[in-house]
Image (cartoon, rainbow, N blue to C red):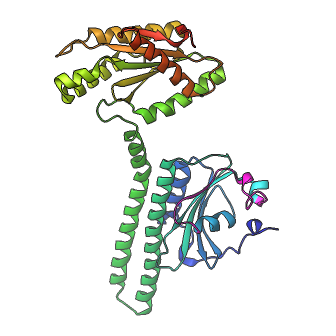
Amino acid sequence: MNDASRTPPIIECPFLQSDEKDGVDHLVHLAAEICDAPMAALALVENRRILWRSGVGISGGESAFCLQALAHNSPWTVKDARQEARFRQHAWVTGEPHVRSFIGTPLAAFSGGSEGVLCIWDTRSRSFSEREMRAVVQIGHALTAHLDLMSHTAALETRLIRSGEDEALLQDQINWINNYGRDLEVRAARLEAINARLEALAKLDGMTGLKNHRAFQERLETEFQRASRYNMPLSLLLLDVDHFKSFNDTYGHLAGDEVLKVLAHVLQESARGLDFVARYGGEEFVMILPHADYLGAVGIGQRMREGIEAASWPHRPITASVGVSTLTRAMERPSDMIAHADRALYASKAGGRNRVTHARDLREV
């Protein structure tokens, strides 16, 4: 039997026993929920011995994954344990619960003298997102603070009782500690909401309020996979403001920024409810058009072009060129749709601008 399949003894530590009121279980549950994983645990380690503290979805101790994570200074992940030599024969991989992926982050040593690691297992082969890794680290920090407080509390209570200190002083200390513990629980409960807000902000374009390039790429991947799987129409529209450089040179970049803001508003107002509008970069915008075939996508492109041309512009008329692509069986990845739409956009600009061109109408496509 290899090292990965052996489990060190599970040791009990009095002040670390589970208590619904101490908040540790809540933080471990929160880590599992944020990572959408069925199993999570807090393991404490002394001389490579596991002190099992709190678990979600598991009934016993496991050491190989935890100890490996403890050896790293940052979150450590396994995408597919079956592909890792040290884990492919592990009992948790070859049998129940059939672990496939893992993420663990070490906890700083606290005053109790132990080291710790927050561990999360999934039965799916997967990569963990940057958001999930940030959240796991933050929960690890909260667990360290909480355990440090618990260790300090246990030592304080012991000293006060042994030294015969006044009972009122002991109660004051305990009240302070309980209040601090509740504050930690509140902060932990807010952690997921804070990360969700940060994730949402990271996907917004600050100037126009539209989704940004990162959000567009993620959404296109999702829509591409869905349309390919269920054989549904899907189109992509790329839009570029005509002669925008000369506009900026003549009226200044602040005026140019206002053009982009108004144009973003026009696109949002003209889009269907299921369309996804984003700023692609610079003066380019993009729209993902679910359930839109060749004719539908061209019609939407024409409506967008006409809406921009008809809008009220303070300095001079603004027009836009549009390139459109529609998913075909020959397209193997989302970038193929972008490349086809980009070629169609180039054709619109080369053909005189302020027009809509579909990639299917180009002889080279």
Q: In the rendering, at what x and y percent does residue 338 appear?
A: 51, 24
Q: In the rendering, at what x and y percent does residue 153 appear?
A: 43, 78
**In this image, 91 relative to 71: left or right?**
right
Q: Is residue 74 magenta?
A: yes
Which residues, given as a range, are shown in magenta?
Answer: 71-91
Furthest toward the right, the residue is 1
- Determine the residue positioned at 68% across, 73% down: 10
Q: Is the magenta region chiefly helix, strand or loop?
A: loop
Tell me if residue 309 comes above or below residue 137 in the rendering: above
Q: Quadrant of residue 305?
A: top left
- Determine the residue positioned at 53% across, 61% down: 25
**In this image, 336 relative to 329: left or right?**
left
Q: Quadrant of residue 206?
A: top left
Q: In the rendering, at what x and y percent does residue 270 appear?
A: 36, 14
Front-most of 57 and 356?
Answer: 356
- Determine the residue positioned at 36% across, 20% down: 240
